[in-house]
Image (spheres, grey):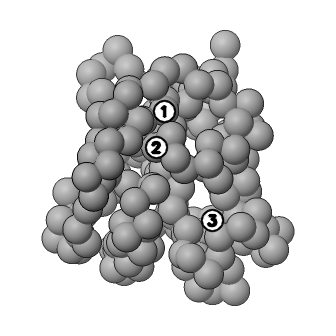
């Protein structure tokens, strides 16, 4: 299936779908620290920031013309010295999970990092999210740290794992 995926820059008309895909992950309590659904207006500043920064892309993935997921490379920590480091986020429509699209999108990010001056990619993943941890480990991301019990979801404290990979030397 991944050979049928087309990746393109996100546009304004994608925002509702991006938010819908994001919101679909909230009830599972494995992917995001948001505990309530977010609105399009809630996500607009994040979307606009990506649109305004040519070095921090937001892409959508399409399968047969339908948006099946999205990928972003976001600023890490917001200070100039970290410009060559980006946080990667991948979110897939639940109908398209487990089909190799996440792997395809990670490879896509690797292939384009040099265009944006990105040398290091970070992923922030809840420790209980084994599918995402395995996915990033498959691509030789290393566990660079753990923030123990920094999130509380439905009364359960959760660890946050920082995965990292150096893309360029």
Q: Are marks 1 and 2 in contact (CB under 8 Å)?
A: yes
Gap between marks 1 and 3 measured at Cα: 27 Å
Instruction: Look at 83% across and 68% down and name the residue there.
Output: 3
From the image, state whether disc 1 or disc 3 is nearer to you: 1
Q: Earlier in the sequence, mark 1 or mark 2?
A: 2
The secondary element bearing badge 3 is classed as: strand
Nearest the eye: 126 or 117: 126
User: Disc number at residue 150?
Assistant: none
From the image, state whether disc 2 or disc 3 is nearer to you: 2
Residue at image mark 3: 7
- The answer to whether 80 is drawn above or below residue 78 in the figure is above
Position in image of residue 144 (x %, y %): 54, 20
- The answer to whether 99 is drawn above or below residue 142 in the figure is below
Q: Earlier in the sequence, mark 2 or mark 3?
A: 3
User: In which image quadrant can residue 138 be found?
Assistant: top right
The secondary element bearing badge 1 is classed as: strand
Instruction: Look at 38% across and 28% down and name the residue there.
Output: 148
Mark 1 crowdedness (10 Å alpha carbons): few <14, some 14-19, many ≥20: many
Nearest the eye: 49 or 128: 128
Classify the position of the N terminus by image quarter. bottom right
User: Disc number at residue 161?
Assistant: 1
Residue at image mark 2: 126
């Amino acid at each position: 299936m991944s050979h049928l995926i087309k990746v393109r820059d996100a546009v304004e008309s994608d925002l509702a779908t991006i938010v819908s895909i994001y919101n679909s992950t909230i009830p599972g309590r494995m992917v995001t620290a948001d505990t309530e659904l977010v609105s399009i207006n809630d996500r607009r500043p994040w979307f606009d920031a990506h649109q305004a920064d040519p070095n921090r892309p937001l892409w959508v993935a399409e399968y047969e013309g339908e948006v099946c997921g999205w990928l972003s490379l976001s600023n890490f920590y917001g200070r100039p010295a970290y410009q060559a480091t980006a946080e990667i986020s991948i979110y897939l429509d639940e109908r398209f999970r487990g089909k190799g699209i996440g792997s395809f999108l990670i490879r896509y990010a690797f292939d384009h990092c040099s265009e944006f001056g990105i040398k290091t990619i970070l992923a922030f993943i809840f420790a209980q999210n084994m599918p995402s941890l395995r996915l990033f480990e498959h691509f030789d991301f290393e566990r660079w740290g753990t923030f123990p019990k920094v999130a509380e979801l439905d009364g359960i404290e959760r660890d946050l794992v920082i995965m990292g990979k150096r893309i360029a030397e």
